[in-house]
Image: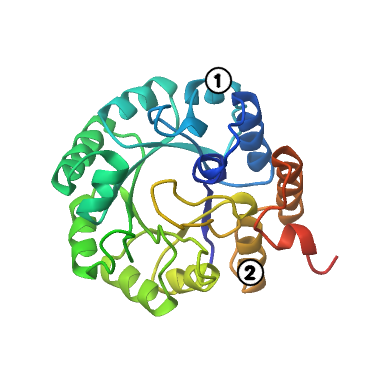
Amino acid sequence: MRVLLCDVGPRDGLQNEAEVLPPETRAELVDRLAAAGLPRIEAVSFVRADRVTQMADAEQVIERVHAREGVELSGLVLNERGWERFAAAGLDRVNVTLAATETFNLRNGNATLAEAIERVESILAAAGHTPATVTISCSFGCPFEGRVDPGNVAELASRFSDRAEVVLADTIGVATPSAVRSLLEQVRAAGFHGHNTRNTGYANCLAALEGGARVLDASVGGLGGCPFSPRATGNVATEDLVYLLEGEGVETGVDLDALVGVSQWLESVLGRTLEGYVYRAGTWPP
């Protein structure tokens, strides 16, 4: 089995950091991840700087990134203005997101669920032949509305699956493996975006593969969370997930030693210990 890993650290990871890194440092992070063999990297998000200061100057980041063959760079958009900025930047893949619940859409994107659906439809129409991912956040639970009906998620996914890769996100880290496996099978989603908030993220990734997913999101060093979700902590750490998957016979194409080096470098940049384990414990055998 082979899986495509998407490192969301430069976007989902850094957006939850108190420190705002300059564009050249964020671009260097993307370059280092690409050099480690990550086949897809979510490099930036095209959102308002006054809402997510850490993601300001996305265009300057992209200008500084060095193109590398075989590496797909994606950018997150929430609305039509974000799409316009994405299109001008010339990235490889657009990731448009909406939440499975009314309240989270209002808090995160200032739109009702119906309006969020319309925005996604509009962006996919504009995208044309540009590869697209639709990420459905809060697929397993919402910080404001609680449990989410799997049927609602399935209905949302069915709207877009013929035009885009659909990824189900456990935005607040409440899912357990049986729920992930079941929903992935029901929805036939292409991918899974897990958080390790309650220490179930890695088991959930394995369950997602069993449910048919072939794309997994992860974040270098375990950075991340969601500034609009109370108490939502980091994503699964990319290097920890690579260690697990390779040990289970799942090919990733990622150079684990090089990836560990990226987390070690990032630790020095942020001046704190990161959430991941493998970069501190080391690979095995040493």
Q: In the rendered image of this protein, does residue 203 appear above or below residue 39?
A: below
> Residue 257 got which mark?
none
Q: Nearer the viewer, residue 78 or 190?
A: 78
Q: Is residue 41 visible?
A: yes
Q: In the rendered image of this protein, does residue 238 appear above or below residue 73?
A: below
Q: How is the image coloured?
A: rainbow
Upstream in sequence: badge 1 or badge 2: 1
Q: Position of residue 208 (x, y in %)?
A: 43, 69
Tell me: 121 left or right of 40.
left
**Which residue is at 36% across, 24% downward?**
87
Q: How many marks?
A: 2
Q: Nearer the viewer, residue 20 or 3?
A: 20
**Which residue is at 17% across, 45% downward?**
112
Q: In the rendered image of this protein, does residue 46 appear above or below residue 283?
A: above
**Which residue is at 39% across, 53% downward?**
229
Q: Residues within 10 Å of mark 2 (few under 14, many from 20)?
A: some
Question: Which residue does the numbered mark 2 point to in the structure image?
Answer: 244
Give residue 281's quadrant in the image. bottom right
Question: Which residue does the numbered mark 1 point to in the structure image?
Answer: 63
Tell me: 242 left or right of 100.
right
Q: Is residue 253 visible?
A: no
